[in-house]
Image: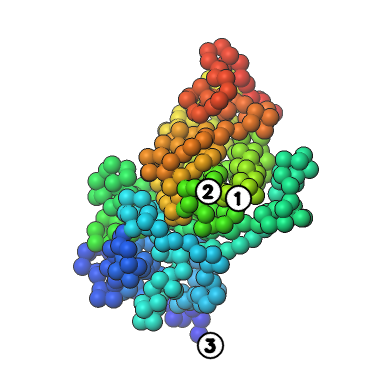
Amino acid sequence: MSTNHDVRKEHVVLATHSNLRYPESLTLDWGNKDPMKRGPVVASQTNPKARNAIGTHSGSYTVYRALSIASGKFSPAHRPDLHNTHSPVKIGPFPSWFDETKIVSLDPWGLDPQNHFKGHFEKGYDIRPSIAVTQAHLQIPEIHDAIRAGRLKPDGKIIKENMDIKITKVAIEPVWFLPGMAKRLNVEEGVLRRILFTESGGMYPELITRPDLKVWLPPIGSTTVYIFGNPEDLSNPNIELSCRVHDECNGSDVFGSDICTCRPYLMYGIEHAAETAQKGGVGIIAYYRKEGRALGEVTKFLVYNARKRQEGGDSAATYFKRTECVAGVEDARFQEFMPDVLHLFGITKIHNLHSMSNMKYNAIVGSGIEVVNRISIPAELIPADANVEMEAKKAAGYFTEGEVKKGEDLQKVKGREIT
């Protein structure tokens, strides 16, 4: 009986030349209105000659897949059976799908590729989805509290009688169109590719040896979108839309750590999204896995320690300074690519944006999406130890309708000491 180890090929072709293009490799015309002319992103490993992208599917989970293959428990020749995996709701196409300036960090045609690229599937191409849509119910304690307090009421449609919220959720893998990424960052493509290669420890040599390959699937976290109400209404500017774009904070979002406002802000956004949907509008929560301002959880915890041990204690006046001292930058999220997920759904107008961040607001508006109202978190939802973060952000110019503390008043805002 043979195992995966027996059939595994030991010969490896290094991408040290630019003449590795094969006839089987399909051309990508990013932004073309016809999906067959645009071409599918082929990043699977089952036929290396057909690949037209750098990297492979599953983002950061590629490493776990490699471990499964190495252990002999998973066949590298596996091809997914996509029967009955299609989206339960219709999404797109929208004009933003055909504008390579609007979407550069994901592949809209990666949703249900078995339908968009049926002819290529019939020819044997192993084209994998990079977007998946399903439906579910959310069970959230804060929503139960809002119902008990009378702020929300079950309607049997959006909020069920058992207090569950019915939603549509969308999982999105990162697919980076490098020329568009470079243009968005105002840098030459060659410079961007070289820095990506260097800072990833040379993990993807094709970034500098295969200029003909314009798409990269980076090994980073994915994005999940939660839609409240009819997903098709997201593209209708005449229907009220409430939106929260949220960057992951595992400590707060999952475990309820009180040093920041992440979970309270997320829950407030969900409550308002559900309420908007109940009124005939639509709500959307876009959840990006960019932990700790995209600096990582280790760096975030180091910053927490530095803040609390500095002379004078954890103070709103020095909140950002300690982050930059440890990490080298205040914030590495650089929200230039964040609006892509909104353009995936054809959004052109947001009536209620739950965000204090000017970086997010400017990126959204700069991408051509109108924002009517900005909503900050109510004071009563801010945990005591998170006031340091909140007052520091207000003082730094973040959006707020409340008082902005300065000077001694700002220095007096202190967090807990390490005990």
Give the residue pinned by disc 3.
1
Q: Which quadrant holds the C terminus?
A: top right
Q: Residue at x 51, y 29 (%)?
A: 399
Q: Amino acid at mark 2?
A: Ile
The residue mark sitting in front, 3 or 1, is 1
Q: Secondary structure at mark 3?
A: loop
Whole-percent x, y for residue 323 in the image: 49, 31
Tell which residue pokes out farthest to the bottom in this image: 1
Whole-percent x, y for residue 81 in the image: 51, 77
Q: Label 2 near label 1: C-beta < 8 Å?
A: yes
Tell which residue pokes out farthest to the front in this image: 238
Give the residue pinned by disc 2.
239
| Number of residues whose C-alpha sits closer than 10 Å to that of mark 2, classed few (under 14), some (14–19) or many (20 or more) | some
Q: Label 1 near label 3: C-beta < 8 Å?
A: no
| Number of residues whose C-alpha sits closer than 10 Å to that of mark 1, classed few (under 14), some (14–19) or many (20 or more) | few
Give the residue pinned by disc 1.
280
Q: Amino acid at mark 3?
A: Met
Q: Residue at x 57, y 57 (%)?
A: 230
Whole-percent x, y for residue 247 in the image: 53, 44
Question: In the rendered image, is residue 385 in sight?
Answer: no
In the rendered structure, which disc, 1 or 2, sits on the residue that comes first in sequence?
2
User: Alpha-carbon distance for marks 2 and 3?
Assistant: 61 Å
User: Alpha-carbon distance for marks 3 and 1?
Assistant: 60 Å
Q: Residue at x 48, y 52 (%)?
A: 236
**What's the mark number on residue 153?**
none
